[in-house]
Image: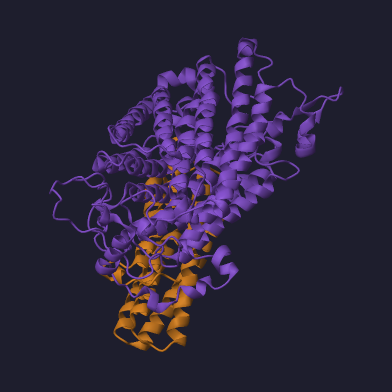
Chain colours: A purple, B orange
Amino acid sequence: MTELTSNATEEKLVQELGYDDHFHEHHDGDKFQSNFITTYVFSLDHKVIARQFLITGIFWAFIAGLMSLVFRLQLGFPEEDMAWLRPFLGKWVTLSEEGVGAISPEFYYAMVTMHGTILVFFVLTAGLSGTFSNLLIPLQLGARDMASPLLNMLSYWFFFLGGLIMFLSLFLSTGPFSGGWTAYPPLSILPQASSGSGAGMTMWSLSLVMFVVSVLLGGINYISTILNLRTKGMTLWRMPLTIWTFFITAIVGLLSFPVLASAVFLVFFDRSLGTSFFLNEINIGGEALAQSGGSPILFQHLFWFLGHPEVYIIILPAMGMVSEVLSVNSRKPIFGYKAMVFSVVAIAFLSFIVWAHHMFMSGVNPFISNFFVVFTLIIAVPSAVKVFNWIATLYKGNVRLNAASMFSIGFVSMFISGGLTGIFLGNSAIDIQMHDTYFVVAHFHIVMGVAAFFGMFAGIYHWYPKMFGRHMNKLLGNIHFWGTMISAYAVFWPMHYLGIAGVPRRYYSFDVFQTFDHFDDMNKFITIAAFAVFLFQLVFVLNFFYSIWFGKKQTKKNPYGATTLEWTTPIEAIHGNWPGKIPTVQRWAYDYSKDGTDYLPQHLPKQDFESDEVH
Amino acid sequence: MQTVKLKQTKRNKIDPKIFALLLACASMTMVFLAYTSAYIIRQAAGNWLEFRLPNEFFISTGILFLSSICIHFSYRFFKKKNTSLYRGLLLLTLVLGIIFIYIQYLGWQQMLTMGIELNTNPSGSFVYVISGMHIAHVFGGLGVLITALLHAFLLEHRVTEKRILRFRLTLIYWHFVDFLWIYLLIFFTLQKV
């Protein structure tokens, strides 16, 4: 059987059965890669754009991680002298008369806000789905590039522009926006509300509008590429699950992000033109505000109509990549392929009708809450189907343990832990106790923060050879995984206890609440664990950049013995992906361990010895 | 726009660019669905000033609809190689588009004389913001139309696949902003009751 899957045989298959689109006779793509600027900066090649998204994402993750350390320092060690931070943070560390430094409350809130905004939008949306949709959609579908490389490039540069504006806002003398990543009015509308609500908020909203443009351009491209540029034989039911999740994610993004833009526009009108969509009966310094008659709850509806689908925009691509990595590394077909697809579709559909579960305690009608409780809890069904399928894929598999597969298994673990607490929070009655506590913080960090990061790491380790032609270091990968796994749980597990005891999130300090005094040590422990998480990410960053130049070279086209098409492209990536013909697809993406073979690649026609079983 | 030249796309009935435009229209529709649902929610909360929409908005609707018909026939004459009607009707579409925006502006003036300013009550603010947002999209359409007119007058009239595609993209977008406004007008009218 081995000869079926050797390099030479696979190459022959592409040439004999491949589809000739005469791509390389035109050479019109070449002129777009003729110099440094068009090759690496304003590139139209999807593989370069993917790497741009990834490296920008890593940059932002680093910044947002540092921010979390700043506010964790405040929460863990509120009494300590922070004067040593003055060289970095300047006036945001205030000195008392005795010379004891403290992080200023305004800065604390700005850091919390920026941490959320950056991670949700710039890292886990752009860095995750921007990177892997760009890299994998054309490669796994057998396409030369995206449907519109130009829109694809614009998508990255709008993201870059949005990021640049946000980055500059960090250096405003009044500080960046500090009213929470949800930007609820009136904090986001009235400049009097906080120092970040003036110029900081203006730049925040501008940045987000740029970001929405980026997501829409990207999403339009992903969807039209998936529906129009599949190679011969690549029917929808033969697509790898990665592509399915990128596809559904793009649709969800296309329908929900415009709503965020609309809400931000209305905020702009309230801020600058005196309308009162979201303002009602506000007194500032004893004087009534002229703007009245609006509803702040209306903003919450608009925001969460994006905000909830957004968490699935983050987690779905991670789920797709985990499915793929688990299947390759357990040498088994993914368990319940169609069930996986249907549950992704179901989750995406449900994500649009559960948004008010973020607003149970904001004064919405409790009877309306019931509706949202029911649909929220129903999400547990497709989620459980997926978890069951991942575990069943691993069960009795010939599991290869490497950084990619361990992060995938870690993903499943995180998704279960974080998902179960979602069932608590989805109940509007339990939410009366739990809302706005550290229980919520623990829930969403585990289920969509850490889990999505794990999916992203799995993807990076797995497809690194496809991006840079080299492998990442195994030992450093293992250290990164075990360190992150343990210390991330150490950060978020104790938060459940804080939350159940009623410790509110977002508070700058708990000095005046004696009832929370006995959590001081727990808060110290969490802070130390957060530093540990950050240190282990430095291991990853080191490994990532070191391996670009010095990593072990990829020698085999298909180093993992995977079935999908991206491993039929040459090691040295070229414009147009395949040197000659495009491979045609003869089977689904998960023929592992079939009829005594190790794997049967997607472009291999049906063999005589194969049974007729249909997946 | 440079796109990857792939013969395999021919097996699909719909051109990727047209498909991408339809997707973009879907996401633009979401912006207006968000505004109109916000309108409904806000209206239900009370403290809502009822007023009659100025007649100008109804007149402008007719003008915009007429422009849609013009561009539709311009497209037909383009394919039939009737150069003068193709050019004339396309120019008329642009003129009607500009008149539409002017009449919308008159509608705003009328609202001001009725005493409904941008910040009087959310009911008025919504009408200003939604119609303003729509005008922004019409401006985009005008840009596209001007490009199409440049093609019509500067290039030789040849019916090539590329030019049919370009024209169809223009056509779809212009119809989109037209039907979008008809939806918005019907929405405003029905919600007033």
Q: Nearer the viewer, residue A438 or A10?
A: A10
Q: Position of residue A273 (x, y in %)?
A: 62, 49
Quarter that holds the C terminus of chain A: top left
Given residues A240 and B188, the one toward you in this image is: A240
State which quadrant residue A310 falls in.
Answer: top left
Picture layout, residue A52 above or below residue B101: above
Q: How many marks?
A: 0
Position of residue A160 in the picture relative to residue B144 (left or right)? right
In front of the other: A297 or A569 = A569
* Furthest-right residue in this view: A97
A528 sits left or right of A34 in the view? right
Residue A87: give x, y in percent of width and height: 80, 38
Q: Quadrant of residue A222?
A: bottom left
Question: Nearest the camera: B173 or A440?
Answer: A440
The answer to whether one can see residue A298 in this image is yes
Q: Is residue A188 visible?
A: no
Where residue A340 appears, x then y in whole percent? 29, 40
Residue A10 lies, in percent from the top left, at: 30, 60
| Residue A34, placed above or below residue B110 | below
